[in-house]
Image (cartoon, coloured by chain):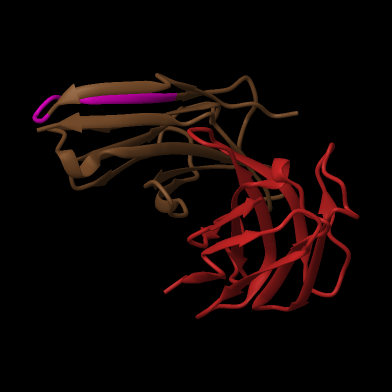
Amino acid sequence: TQLLEQSPQFLSIQEGENLTVYCNSSSVFSSLQWYRQEPGEGPVLLVTVVTGGEVKKLKRLTFQFGDARKDSSLHITAAQPGDTGLYLCAGGNNAGNMLTFGGGTRLMVKP
Amino acid sequence: GAVVSQHPSRVICKSGTSVKIECRSLDFQATTMFWYRQFPKKSLMLMATSNEGSKATYEQGVEKDKFLINHASLTLSTLTVTSAHPEDSSFYICSASPRISGRAHEQFFGPGTRLTVL
């Protein structure tokens, strides 16, 4: 069974601060997705990384896939209240047809 | 693109009744559809995986007779919660993987269905 540990579970910061969310596993994943979910809605795909060491940027968000494809990080620069939500990482299995979700990081950005 | 809809978005039913939730991929064909359950402030828990025209694969601990899944076409999957009880109250979310080479590992999620069983 593949497991993904996400940390921190909860993060409350002030607007303008930077933060990093981590996603770690002892298993290798073929891909790693990051999602953001708001209350009462489904998760929205932010990014997919598939190559070890890959770095992708989405405005103030920077995503990195570990060299060994076992871990990933999400870094947010100058967080804004609109970034508030539940961030979920999910690893794709080798067959590429199933996702294993991390436990989620609940981010609150205060104005 | 890659829009997934769910209907209904919210349903309240009496204990003992059955509830059907629909999941549709609106602008793409889905090789596979997934059904998840999410408890308050928790991550997603995979319930079952379904491929069009075949029986769903259920995760350990999920009763297949309780949660009936039908994947009638490449754009529609349904989840029926049979003889619902209050403990079945939850947020149910579906997702779909596009039938596009190189993108089968991506899942696009519906907006979820909030089920409340009285």
Horizontal side of residue B56 vs B41, given as left or right: right
Q: Where is residue A6 in the image (x, y as percent from the top left)?
A: 48, 24
Q: Does the rendering let one see residue B104?
A: yes
Residue B13 included in the magenta stretch of the image: no
Q: Position of residue B38 (x, y in %)?
A: 58, 42
Q: Where is residue B73 in the image (x, y as percent from the top left)?
A: 73, 80
Q: Residue at x 54, y 39 (%)?
A: A90
Q: Does the rendering let one see residue A94?
A: no
Does residue B64 lie above or below A31 as drawn?
A: below
Does residue A93 lie above or below B51 as drawn?
A: above
- Decide which of A77, A41 is in the foreground and name it: A41
Tint applied to chain A in the drawing: brown
Q: Quadrant where the N terminus of chain B lies? A: bottom left
Looking at the rendering, the stretch of residues picked out in magenta corresponds to: A15-22
Q: Where is residue A41 in the image (x, y as percent from the top left)?
A: 43, 54
- Decide which of B13, B67 is in the foreground and name it: B13
Q: Residue at x 75, y 53 (%)?
A: B15
Horizontal side of residue A17 vs B56, given as left or right: left
Q: Which residue is drawn at 70% across and 44% down?
A: B86
Chain letter matching colour red: B
| Quadrant of residue A17 within the rendered picture | top left
Horizontal side of residue B30 vs A33, given as left or right: right
